[in-house]
Image: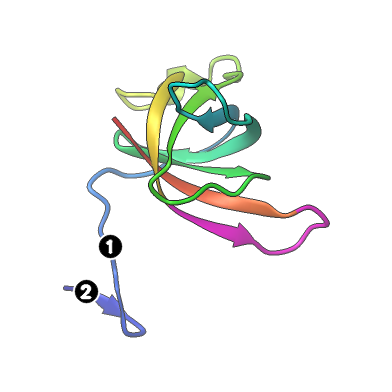
């Protein structure tokens, strides 16, 4: 077990690829209710992604996450597996981000 400052460090199985791609997400529910929210995917890997949005979401919530726009030629420079254009993902954690007049949240997601 590796620690830093008394906290256990989590080693990622797959490296994170930094990005700044616009996304839309909403809770996955059979009633199709739930407000959607726009955000930005800041990084991704084969097992998950990190997005920033203005809506708080509880850990354990399942979201439908859809990439709105890929920059031209962007996927050509990616490793074998690029990000999924649409996926179901479980919220593993969320934190409020500092600064700015409008609250923003960082959300860690694991997709299937």
Query: Residue at (42%, 51%) from the top-left corner?
Result: 59
Mark 1 element type: loop
Local crowd size for mark 2, using a 10 Å CA cut-off: few (<14), some (14–19), many (≥20): few
Q: In screen coordinates, is 100 left or right of 55? A: right
Crowding at mark 1 (Cα within 10 Å: few <14, some 14-19, many 20+) = few
Q: Depth check: give the residue in front, 60 or 17.
A: 60
Give the vertical position of 14 relative to 3 (above or below): above
Q: CA distance from mark 1 to mark 2?
A: 8 Å
Give, as a single range, the part of the protein colored magenta: 93-102
Left or right: 96 with respect to 93?
right
| Circle 2 SS class | loop
- In the shown orientation, is residue 31 left or right of residue 45? right
Tell me the residue that label 1 is attached to.
10
Residue 6, image quadrant: bottom left
Q: Which of the two discs, 1 and 2, labels the residue nearer the N terminus?
A: 2
Residue at screen point 59% across, 27% down = 24
Q: Position of residue 63 (x, y in %)?
A: 46, 33
In contact (CB < 8 Å): disc 1 and disc 2: no
Per the image, the residue denoted by label 2 is 2
């Amino acid at each position: 077990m590796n620690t830093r400052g008394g906290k256990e460090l989590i080693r990622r199985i797959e490296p994170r690829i930094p990005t700044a791609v616009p996304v839309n997400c909403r809770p996955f529910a059979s009633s199709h209710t739930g407000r959607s929210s726009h955000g930005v995917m800041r990084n991704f890997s084969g097992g998950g992604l990190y997005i920033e949005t203005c809506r708080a979401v509880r850990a354990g919530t399942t979201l439908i996450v859809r990439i709105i726009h890929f920059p031209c030629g962007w996927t050509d420079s990616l490793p074998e597996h690029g990000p999924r254009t649409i996926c179901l993902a479980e919220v593993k954690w969320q934190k409020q981000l500092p600064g700015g007049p409008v609250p923003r949240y960082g959300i860690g997601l694991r997709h299937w």
